[in-house]
Image (spheres, rainbow, N blue to C red):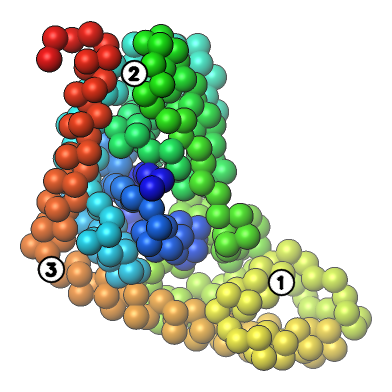
């Protein structure tokens, strides 16, 4: 059975982009793969070492994963910081990761620009820790977005270097697991790119009906079509993408006809969309709050996840120490 690892930094609420970009696919993967889905709380320290919300944000992700349908009997949901074996492996991997290649990493360069007063060693070795996260379970598939592909390429370099140095075919090469056709890209509401936290255009899975309506009503539009079958501007295309995801085909066709015959009222479309999006978010939102109230239960899930992750990690680390030549 293939093994899958994916991590998410606990930076706050999760949004519809997270749901359709990752979580929805995790729910499918849990049926067919050995899955390790963890919260990369240590990675998050590379940008915010002091963070009062670290624990709360970690629990929020667990609550959200469960609310969306991840089954803790099928997958391991755990905190990176609960698995010390990851950090020991990270130390060994640091001896074969070179300064030059780490400095060339695009995300490192971007972060260094963003936080010039805090270009810490953890930031530089971020891809090394990420490699340890993955190979501690000897995983071969990593479901991540495009922005993480360079990290995975680096992980493959470190892994093949390890295997070459010790002349052993021990770690499998981790490849990005792409969902291809399955991947629904949630657009931004401000008319550009995809939905993301940083752009401040996201609908969160915890947003209530009023907030959702406010956000959707604020979505960028244009001045409307002036001739039949006029091609759509980017922001209008985005609204239709939302319709495709959250409304029925009939409703989609109704608004498309309205557009093509220049009768469309964008406000009608937006009110309609807001309602449909809320219908989708509401049951998830309610479950998130329910789980979040029950901290003991979330702790229990994290504990079980920790046990599963550690039992896999301990095995790998023991092998690694033997390969390196420690007397075990
Ligand atoms: N770097 C990833 C991100 O920012 C998070 C992450 C950490 C991760 N370790 C990982 C993802 C291991 C996949 C596998 O999104």
Q: Distance between the residues labelled 2 and 3?
A: 38 Å
Looking at this view, is 157 or 315 the one in front? 315
- Which of disc 1 and disc 2 is earlier in sequence? 2
Rendered image quadrant of residue 98: top left
Look at the image and tell me whether residue 35 can be seen: yes
Give the percent coordinates (x, y) of residue 46. 33, 31
Location of mark 1 (residue) = 236
| Contact check, label 2 and label 3, Cβ < 8 Å | no
Q: Residue 59 carries which label?
A: none
Q: Is mark 1 on a helix, strand or loop?
A: helix
Looking at this view, is 299 or 227 the one in front? 299
Q: Is mark 2 on a helix, strand or loop?
A: helix
- Which of disc 3 and disc 2 is earlier in sequence? 2
Give the percent coordinates (x, y) of residue 197. 46, 54
213 lies left or right of 307: right
**Taking 100 as reference, is 309 above or below it?**
below
Q: Distance between the residues labelled 2 and 1?
A: 48 Å
Location of mark 2 (residue) = 93
Location of mark 3 (residue) = 294
């Amino acid at each position: 059975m293939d093994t899958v690892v994916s991590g998410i930094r606990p930076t706050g609420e999760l949004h519809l982009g997270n749901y359709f970009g990752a979580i929805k696919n995790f729910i499918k993967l849990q049926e067919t793969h050995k899955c390790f889905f963890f919260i990369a709380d240590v990675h998050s320290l590379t940008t915010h070492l002091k963070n009062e919300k670290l624990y709360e944000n970690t629990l929020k992700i667990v609550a959200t994963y469960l609310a969306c349908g991840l089954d803790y009997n099928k997958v391991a949901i755990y905190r990176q910081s609960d698995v010390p074996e990851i950090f020991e492996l990270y130390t060994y991997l640091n001896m074969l990761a070179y300064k030059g290649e780490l400095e060339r990493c695009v995300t490192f360069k971007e972060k260094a620009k963003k936080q010039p007063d805090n270009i810490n060693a953890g930031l530089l070795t971020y891809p090394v820790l990420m490699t340890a996260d993955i190979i501690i379970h000897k995983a071969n598939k990593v479901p991540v977005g495009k922005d993480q592909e360079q990290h995975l390429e680096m992980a493959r370099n470190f892994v093949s270097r390890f295997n070459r140095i010790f002349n052993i075919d021990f770690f499998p090469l981790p490849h990005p697991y792409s969902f291809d056709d399955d991947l629904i890209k949630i657009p931004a509401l401000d008319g550009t790119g995809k939905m993301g936290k940083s752009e401040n255009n996201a609908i969160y899975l915890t947003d209530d009906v009023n907030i959702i309506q406010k956000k959707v009503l604020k979505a960028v539009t244009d001045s409307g079509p002036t001739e039949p079958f006029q091609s759509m501007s980017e922001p209008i295309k985005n609204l239709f993408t939302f319709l495709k995801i959250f409304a029925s085909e009939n409703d989609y066709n109704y608004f498309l006809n309205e557009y093509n015959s220049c009768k469309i009222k964008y406000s009608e479309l937006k009110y309609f969309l807001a309602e449909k999006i809320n219908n989708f978010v509401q049951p998830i939102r309610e479950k998130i709050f329910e789980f979040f109230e029950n901290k003991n239960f979330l702790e229990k899930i994290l504990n079980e996840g920790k046990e599963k992750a550690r039992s896999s990690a301990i095995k790998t680390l023991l092998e690694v120490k033997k390969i390196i030549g420690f007397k075990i």
